Image (cartoon, rainbow, N blue to C red):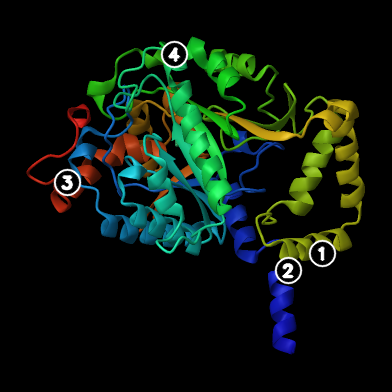
Amino acid sequence: MGVRLRRWERITRPVDPETRAAYARRWEELPERSRTPAQTIGRHAVGCEGTHGVFPRCNFSCQPCYHSAEANRVRVDGAHTVAQVRDQMALTRKLRGPHGHAQLIGGEVSLLEPEDHAEVLAVMRSFGRNPMSMTHGDFDYDYLRRVCVDPGGRPRFGYVSFAGHFDTTMIGRAGARRPQRESELHGHRRAFCDMFTRLHDEYGIRSYLAHNMTVTPANAAQVPEVIGACRDMGFKMFSFQPAAHVGNTVRWKEDYHSLDPDAIWARIEEGAGSRLPWDVLEVGDTRCNRTAWGFYVGDRWHSLLDGDDERDLEARDDFFRYLGGVHFNAPPKLLAARLARVVAAHPSTVATGLGWLTRAVRRVGPAELARHRPEPMTFVMHRFMHADDVAAAWELMEKGERSGDPRIIETQERLAACSYAMAHPESGRLVPACVQHSVLDPEENRQLSQLLPLPTVRSTPPAAAQ
Ligand code: SF4
């Protein structure tokens, strides 16, 4: 009995001790300028994780593409993918604690055989990661079904998470090989979402879908139109990546230095039909990430927190103080027990929570809420950095030196606050994805192309050629 009670006491602790330790380390690592009251890293998040070197190849030829030219010389190999992902996740589990969000990213994930894709997702989950498969979305329902449902017709997962990348920088999509306007892709965006609706209808498997779009000078003006036309398709996140000079130089077609983050965010706000406050909750350095969490009620988007209301900001601070690190994806009974312990220790959390809820309902309007169900929607802008800057900054950081050049200082600060890490089991380190793509990818892919050479007779369509 004593053992069971001790175990119950341990698992119902609001925050796992390993999570707490990982948060403390993350906070310690953050540069001073990122330690703001709005910062989520080190308070309620460790940051996002991504895989690398596990299936570098892609059958599209996007312009730009942040993968190195060598990536397409590597054969997709399920056994290699599973083994590498296992090692990488073991390291993130060790350094980042028992829970995390990890992107299954290469190359193109749907080039994996469905069985291999499913096995990798299971491996990631076994390390406490919530995996998101990053794809161009150019696969059919049968592929999705075989990933998510076993040969006996039983769902492998109750819930899956996919990010579909759709935009006019992409070349090779069936039925839209070289799209000229974003609107030409709306049918493909809808078909992608519809596959997951069908998966739910037939097998009860729920999904979280994100929409990714690379923003270039050529398509920036179409951002509002993409959001407006695709808002109700089933995506729960719209994530925009202003293009950077990174990856395969042959694929750079415009000057990406001219992309202004404020101007792009204004386009996103125009599409959302609302101001999108990105400074009430921050993820790492805001020059890398802007995130606005909220929900639609009818046609209007509402922020989770009103940054102009002191009481909402106090509620945010209380959330970090008392609930930061609570794993909300836990089974309901366990979560209820953990929350009960928080309330028992800090009864003021009830009043704080009710106060926030009351204000939110007033803001939205009870009549509107009676007519429409709130639909969660997050808007994100993630700005990868230019490879030359990253290489210069990283070289100095590896020597423990700080640059005297303001542009490289900014790069160093952003790398130090990075919220998107990739694991290197051979060195026991996590590195920023910018460093992975700008510095490490070319040599890593060169070695992989020797380990996993392409078959002599090529079977991929010409669009994938470099
Ligand atoms: S350093 Fe690079 S990978 Fe990390 S958060 Fe900033 S832009 Fe993203």
What is the distance, in whole Å, between disc 2 and disc 3 at their CAs?
47 Å
Q: Earlier in the sequence, mark 4 or mark 3?
A: 4
Q: Earlier in the sequence, mark 2 or mark 3?
A: 2
Q: Earlier in the sequence, mark 3 or mark 1?
A: 1
Rendered image quadrant of residue 353: top right
Q: Can you name the residue that lies furthest to the bottom here?
A: 1
Instruction: Indicate which disc residue 341 carries.
Output: 1
Residue 66 in percent (x, y) is at 33, 31
Query: Which image quarter is the N terminus in?
Result: bottom right
Q: Secondary structure at mark 1?
A: helix
- The residue to which callout 4 is attached is 219
Q: Nearer the viewer, mark 4 or mark 3?
A: 4
Badge 3, how many Cα within 10 Å: few under 14, some, many 20+?
Answer: some
Q: Nearer the viewer, mark 4 or mark 1?
A: 4
What is the distance, in whole Å, between disc 4 and disc 2 at their CAs?
49 Å
Residue 370 in percent (x, y) is at 86, 32
Dot 1 amino acid type: Arg
Residue 118 in percent (x, y) is at 41, 56
Image point (29%, 41%), residue name:
440
Q: Nearer the viewer, mark 4 or mark 2?
A: 4
Q: Are marks 1 and 2 in contact (CB under 8 Å)?
A: yes
Rendered image quadrant of residue 457: top left
Q: Is residue 406 above or below residue 351?
A: above
- The residue to which callout 3 is attached is 449
Dot 3 amino acid type: Ser
Which residue is at the front of the view, 147 or 388?
A: 147
Dot 2 amino acid type: Thr
Q: Secondary structure at mark 2?
A: loop
Badge 1, how many Cα within 10 Å: few under 14, some, many 20+?
Answer: some
- The residue to which callout 2 is attached is 12
Q: Is residue 126 left or right of residue 355?
A: left
